[in-house]
Amino acid sequence: MTSSAHATLLAYLDSAGLTHETGARDGEVVVELPGEKKLKTVTSVVVGESALTAVAFVIRNPDENHAQVYRYLLRKNLRLPGAAYAIDPSGDVYVTARLPLAGVDADALDALFGLILDAADSHFNELLALGFLSSMKKEWEWRISRGESLRNLAAFRSLLEAETGVSAPDGAF
């Protein structure tokens, strides 16, 4: 069953046009899921003895507001069928999901990767604003003071202008 599920996974990834490579562990495939808010979500998929497990990095350990970040994630866990947010020993945030090998087919994989991508990508900006606002404000002010591009902070423009009282100059994006 393991080799069948692994073959099904590879066939799905090829047909979906998803970039992937063999991982370091037995049965592991590392997949890049293209996102909108987060440019890509790197996902480790391991075909084990009884289940296919997918784990994707979401954000690094927040700089601040840990309780608010974790509360946000725990509330989102209620709406993640078959998946959950988790943290590693360093405090980095991941989303993980498991699929029984008997259920591995193209439709189930499509649903799994859609769920993983949505969990990692759709809440990305909110998580950054909750966990890294102080750093973002410093970067905002530093970039404006030096005439640097603000393109990487464009999604947070109104929040940062309100928080810092410093408006972006014309053409900064």
Image (cartoon, rainbow, N blue to C red):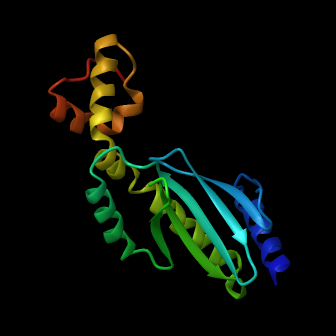
Residue 171 visible here:
no
Give percent across and percent down for residue 43: 62, 58
> Eyeballing the image, is 172 above or below 162?
above
Number of numbered discs on residues: 0
Q: Position of residue 28 (x, y in %)?
A: 75, 64
**Residue drawn where x is 27% and y is 51% of the image:** 65
Q: Residue at x 28, y 40 (%)?
A: 133
Determine the residue located farthest toward the front in the rendered image: 89
Q: Residue at x 20, y 23 (%)?
A: 167
Q: Residue furthest bottom?
A: 102
Q: Please indicate whether residue 69 sits to the left or right of residue 37 in the image.
A: left
Q: Quadrant of the C terminus?
A: top left
Residue 72: percent from the left, percent from the top?
30, 63
Name the quadrant containing residue 47: bottom right
One can see residue 41 in this view = yes
158 versus 130 height, above or below: above
The extreme top residue here reads 146
Q: Is 162 on the left or on the right of 92, as rendered?
A: left
Where does the N terminus fall, quadrant-wise?
bottom right
Query: Measured from the top left, where is residue 6 in percent x and y?
Result: 80, 72
Which one is nearer the viewer's eye here, 91 or 160? 91
Q: Which residue is at the front of the view, 83 or 134?
A: 134
Considering only vertical position in the picture, is 78 above or below 168?
Answer: below
Residue at figure coordinates x 18%, y 29% from the top left: 164
Q: Quadrant of residue 73?
A: bottom left
